[in-house]
Image (cartoon, rainbow, N blue to C red):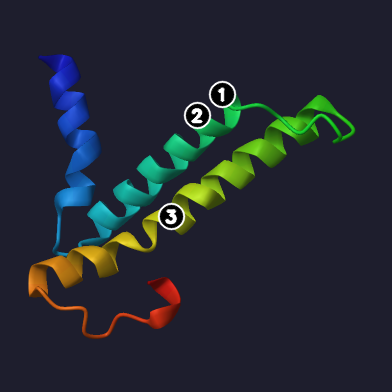
Amino acid sequence: EPLSRRASSFVEPFNDHTGAAKSVVAGLFNLTVIGIIIGLIMPKNERLPTPWYRILSSIIGYTYFIFWCSSFYPQIVMNFQRKSTEGLSIDYS
């Protein structure tokens, strides 16, 4: 029960379509945590001079990647809801 409550509170910001500041901040925090976890788990660039640079570079890189990937989903969801691709840039197709 407590795990399902935590999971639902983690997913809740992504289901809120009101744009409330609390949900936006919670969603950004969740994406940042996901980026940090992936950055810590994935292989590091061994050519960087120190272990701290490797870890920090990996965390920043994967966090950026998570944010970049998630930036495309609102357009996809909106197109699906409208059943139209009106407004879709050809650069993203």
* Residue drawn at 79 percent across, 35 percent down: 53
Assess whether mark 2 and mark 1 are in contact (beta carbons under 8 angstroms). yes
Q: Residue 80 carries which label?
A: none
Horizontal and vertical percent position of residue 33: 44, 36
Toward the viewer: 77 or 63?
A: 77
Q: Is mark 3 on a helix, strand or loop?
A: helix
Position of residue 38 relative to residue 23, above or below, is above
Name the quarter where the N terminus is drawn. top left
- Count residues near mark 1 (Cα–Cα under 10 Å), then give few for <14, some for 14-19, many for 20+: few
Closer to the chain start, of discs 2 and 3, is 2
Left or right relative to 35: residue 4: left
- Count residues near mark 3 (Cα–Cα under 10 Å), then give few for <14, some for 14-19, many for 20+: few
Q: Name the residue under label 1.
A: 41
Q: Disc 1 and disc 3: Cα gap in Å?
A: 19 Å
Disc 2 residue type (three-letter)? Ile
* Residue drawn at 14 percent across, 25 percent down: 5
Q: In which quarter of the image is residue 31?
A: top left
Q: Disc 2 and disc 3: Cα gap in Å?
A: 16 Å
Horizontal and vertical percent position of residue 14: 22, 49
Q: Quadrant of residue 56?
A: top right
Q: Name the residue under label 2.
A: 37
Assess whether mark 3 and mark 2 are in contact (beta carbons under 8 angstroms). no
Closer to the chain start, of discs 1 and 3, is 1
Q: Disc 1 and disc 2: Cα gap in Å?
A: 6 Å
Q: Which mark is residue 69?
A: 3
Horizontal and vertical percent position of residue 4: 14, 21
